[in-house]
């Protein structure tokens, strides 16, 4: 288990990225949800030993993450939000190079590992193509291939499906789901559907603070019977926002569909709808803003 305890970080420009973040991350897929600028990437980089916090501790099993960085790196797989590749190098050659850096120096073992990961990520047939010719989804799959080198026990993926088309997104999420059966995988994202589909445990973070933790299905169940929907004219939106707890809005055919949080029907024309993780996410952020 990964244990994060009262982790805080403020940058020299005064931006508070993390405020006493405490999380327990068990084996399996763990979703970290939050808007852009919430502190997710700062937390991921800190766990990945790429930056220091101001206060707090992180342990992974018997490893003190902040003090035993080399031990962490031996068992870590990391796919950052911005993953660059050498455009003129083939996938196979680049993965072989990463394998050497990871410490897999025995050539037959390295060839076997590279071949296995290219097959696992469905890149074996294009292994000799230059990385610069890969689509966004292919580059992301190559990114997870390099993150899996050395059979890591802790895997961190930061915004892995941003910008992918639906087919590539599904392929990538299926791959993550398979990997997450036997190791700790932290999926940091602002895409609610990714967490709803994959993760057994989750947390919502905003402005550097953890607002909610739990099992996605359990936290969704806590909102059932409390989400109400209505289609309104766009000119009515501000009035509804003043009078009700409107947690989300979306445009539809020139009108606006609003979701309101209420124990009872909040007014004429509202229909009850089944709550989902998006409702949990928006209602949690809204509650934090009002605090």
Image (spheres, helix red, strand yellow):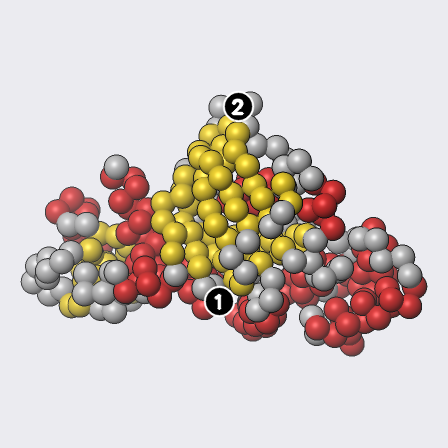
User: According to the image, label 1 marks what residue?
Assistant: 198
Specify few, some or many for label 1: CA neighbours under 10 Å numbering under 14, 14-19, or 20 or more: many
- Secondary structure of the residue carrying tag 2 is loop
Left or right: 179 with respect to 93? left
Q: Residue furthest front?
A: 62
Left or right: 162 with respect to 238? right
Q: Residue furthest bottom?
A: 125
Total count of labels: 2
- Picture coordinates of residue 32, whole percent (x, y): 47, 52
Q: Quadrant of the C terminus?
A: top left
Instruction: Give whichever of 207, 249 is nearer the camera.
Output: 207
Q: Are marks 1 and 2 in contact (CB under 8 Å)?
A: no
- Picture coordinates of residue 206, whole percent (x, y): 40, 42
Task: Please give the name of the residue rendered at 42% of the width and 52% of the height, measured from the top-left corner.
Answer: 203
The image quarter containing residue 96 is bottom right
Left or right: 186 with respect to 130? left
Instruction: Give whichever of 202, 173 is nearer the camera.
Output: 202
Left or right: 77 with respect to 287? right
**Which one is earlier in the sequence, the residue at label 1 or at label 2?**
2
User: According to the image, label 2 marks what residue?
Assistant: 13
**Measured Cα–Cα span from mark 1 to mark 2:** 36 Å
The image quarter containing residue 272 is bottom left
Q: Is residue 212 above or below residue 216?
A: above
Task: Please give the name of the residue rendered at 75% of the width and 63% of the height, measured from the top-left corner.
Answer: 133
């Amino acid at each position: 288990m990964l244990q994060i305890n009262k982790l805080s970080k403020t940058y020299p420009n005064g931006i508070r990225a993390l405020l006493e973040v405490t999380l327990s991350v068990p084996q399996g897929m763990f979703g970290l949800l939050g808007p852009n600028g919430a502190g997710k990437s700062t937390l991921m980089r800190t766990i990945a030993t790429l930056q220091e916090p101001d206060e707090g501790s992180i342990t992974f099993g018997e490893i003190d993450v902040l003090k035993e960085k080399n031990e962490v790196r031996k068992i870590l797989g990391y796919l950052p939000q911005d993953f660059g590749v050498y455009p003129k190098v083939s996938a196979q050659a680049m993965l072989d190079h990463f394998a050497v850096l990871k410490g897999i120096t025995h050539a037959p073992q390295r060839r076997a590992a590279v071949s296995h990961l290219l097959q696992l990520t469905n890149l074996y047939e294009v292994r000799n193509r230059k990385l610069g010719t890969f689509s966004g989804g292919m580059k992301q799959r190559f990114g997870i291939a390099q993150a899996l080198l050395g059979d890591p026990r802790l895997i961190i993926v930061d915004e892995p499906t941003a910008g992918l088309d639906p087919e590539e997104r599904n392929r990538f999420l299926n791959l993550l789901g398979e990997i997450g059966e036997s190791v700790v995988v932290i999926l940091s994202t602002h895409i609610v559907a990714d967490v709803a589909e994959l993760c057994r445990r989750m947390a919502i973070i905003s402005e550097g603070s953890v607002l909610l933790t739990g099992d996605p299905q359990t936290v969704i169940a806590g909102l059932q019977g409390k989400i109400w929907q209505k289609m309104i004219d766009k000119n009515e939106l501000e009035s509804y926002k003043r009078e009700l707890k409107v947690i989300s809005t979306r445009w539809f055919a020139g009108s606006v569909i609003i979701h309101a949080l209420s124990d009872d029907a909040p007014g004429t024309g509202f229909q009850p709808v089944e709550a989902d993780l998006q409702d949990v996410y928006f209602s949690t952020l809204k509650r934090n803003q009002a605090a």
